[in-house]
Image (spheres, rainbow, N blue to C red):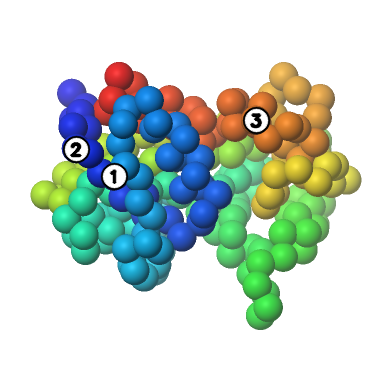
Amino acid sequence: MTRRFDGKRLLVATHNRGKLEEIADLLKPFAVEVVGAAEMGLPEPEETGTTFVENARIKAHAAAKATGLPALSDDSGIAIDALDGAPGVYTADWAETETGRDFVMAMEKTRNALLDSGAAEPWTARFCCTLVLAWPDGSDEVFPGVMEGRVVWPMRGDQGHGYDPIFQPEAYDITFGEMDRWEKNRISHRADAFRKFVKGCFA
């Protein structure tokens, strides 16, 4: 049985303003005050997990323990079958440079890895998102979400972020990078996880 959320304030363990606004908008019908990690002066914990759920748990529990508030965190990335699930939890790491994240470089790295693997197209893949709601008493709830699709080349579209220009979701002929962001937000891996979260803890 999923533990219901009955508080008035929810801490979202992210320093990403866009993600915070997206979650706050989702929770508007439930009269919950949403606050971000940056507002609370929280550092970003080191993500040492090897799975999405481990990293989401690290962030959520660190925030709940530091503030005494229930805390929601997510960890997400793209898993490509021909690369044995890589980049997976290291999705953002593939984009790291000395001057910040370069996702064009990361997408080129991904394509080169696929060509080196010798795998034939279609390059099936999925975007994954795991949400964890952690309580100050140390318990938590886990909500996984996925969006199946495939990696395509060349990059297409300038919407979205990250690997969106090379990910074509199942049943669509356009990439996330070409898709209206509201449509993407409706069908994405994060939307899938959020639906489960709302149904489990609020509905």
> Residue under circle 1?
10
Q: Nearer the viewer, residue 121 or 48?
A: 48
Residue type pointed to by label 1:
Leu
Helix, strand or loop at disc 1?
strand
Residue 132 x, y percent position in the rendering: 33, 43
Residue 125 placement: quadrant: top right
Residue beneath the point at 73% across and 32% down? 180
Q: CA distance from mark 3 to mark 1?
A: 24 Å
Residue beneath the point at 40% across and 31% down? 28
Contact (Cβ within 8 Å) of mark 1 with mark 2: yes
Residue 140 x, y percent position in the rendering: 22, 42
Q: Nearer the viewer, residue 91 or 43?
A: 43
Q: Residues within 10 Å of mark 1 (few under 14, many from 20)?
A: many
> Residue under circle 3?
182
Count of numbered circles on the image: 3
Q: Residues within 10 Å of mark 3 (few under 14, many from 20)?
A: few
> Residue under circle 2?
7
Vertical order, 129 against 67 (above or below): above
Q: CA distance from mark 3 to mark 2?
A: 29 Å
Q: CA distance from mark 1 to mark 2?
A: 7 Å
Q: Residue furthest left?
A: 137
73 sits to left or right of 124: left
Residue 171 x, y percent position in the rendering: 72, 19
